Amino acid sequence: DAGITQSPRYKITETGRQVTLMCHQTWSHSYMFWYRQDLGHGLRLIYYSAAADITDKGEVPDGYVVSRSKTENFPLTLESATRSQTSVYFCASSTQGVEQFFGPGTRLTVL
Amino acid sequence: GEDVEQSLFLSVREGDSSVINCTYTDSSSTYLYWYKQEPGAGLQLLTYIFSNMDMKQDQRLTVLLNKKDKHLSLRIADTQTGDSAIYFCAVYQGGKLIFGQGTELSVKP
């Protein structure tokens, strides 16, 4: 199916574990983004990518790692999960960064 | 950096108009957006307006932009229970979107 998908949709993990959230889009959009959504903070940008092999930090990048070896995939890795990283994570994509289309989100709980 | 502010809650009666307001600080913002988020779902782009426009209308939605006051509003005409959701204002800045906290719209029958 065309569009933007995220997996898993729900994840429970423990403090200190490594977790990778996947994002896949079928539109061949150049730009991809990772946001986290927390009550009282709206959406905050973690990392973004303007093209394959180009990534840049957003507002809250600490504790996260991204890669973009292929245009269609943009995985987000929490190298050593902490409780403060409990959140809902959204991936988005865009042709030129102007009109962003969002995935359904991944709800991550860190115990 | 850019700051985007919205009121947190709005309650209206079905059939009334809803007006959701947003203020921002960076006058150089070129695109301004409204997104809708239903419970458990991602964000859906409702509409956006370019900064050289004052108004944009799309069916029941009207976006008004006052650049002087850095104020953006979204009016939903004939609000329905299906419009109950969180509405986010966002502004474009340097390839990225800066979001407000979201306004939770509650529509009562």
Image (cartoon, coloured by chain):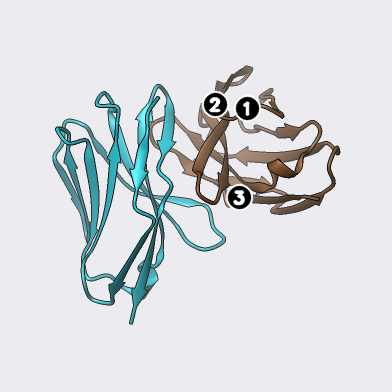
Q: Give the residue pinned by disc 3.
A: A105
State left or right for residue A65 relative to residue A57. Answer: right
Both marks 1 and 3 on one chain: yes
Residue at 51 percent across and 28 percent down: it is A31
Asked if the residue at tag 3 contacts the one at tag 1, i.e. Cβ–Cβ closer than 8 Å, the answer is no
Residue B31 pos. (x, y %): 29, 33
Residue A32's tag is none
Q: Which residue is mark 1?
A: A61
Q: CA distance from mark 1 to mark 2?
A: 6 Å
Q: Chain of mark 3?
A: A
- Which residue is at the front of the view, B54 or B105? B105
Amino acid type of disc 2?
Answer: Gly
Residue sitting at x 81%, y 33%: A80
Amino acid type at mark 1: Pro
Which residue position is annotated with label 2?
A58
> Chain A in the picture: what colour?
brown
Q: Is residue B45 left or right of residue A44?
A: left
First in sequence: mark 1 or mark 3?
1
Callouts 1 and 2 in the same chain: yes
Q: Chain of mark 1?
A: A
Above or below residue B39? Residue A51 is: above
User: From the viewer's perspective, is residue B74 above or below residue A49?
Assistant: below
Secondary structure category for the residue under label 2:
loop
Q: Quadrant of the N terminus of chain B?
A: top left
Nearest to the eye among marks 3 and 2: give it: 2
Query: Mark 3 near mark 2, Cβ–Cβ under 8 Å?
Result: no
> Could you tell me which secondary element the residue under label 1 belongs to?
loop
Provide residue A95's location: percent of width, then percent of height: 44, 30
Task: Check disc 3 and report its element: helix, strand or loop.
Answer: loop
Dot 1 surroundings within 10 Å: few (below 14), some, or many (20 or more)?
A: some
The amino acid at mark 3 is: Gly
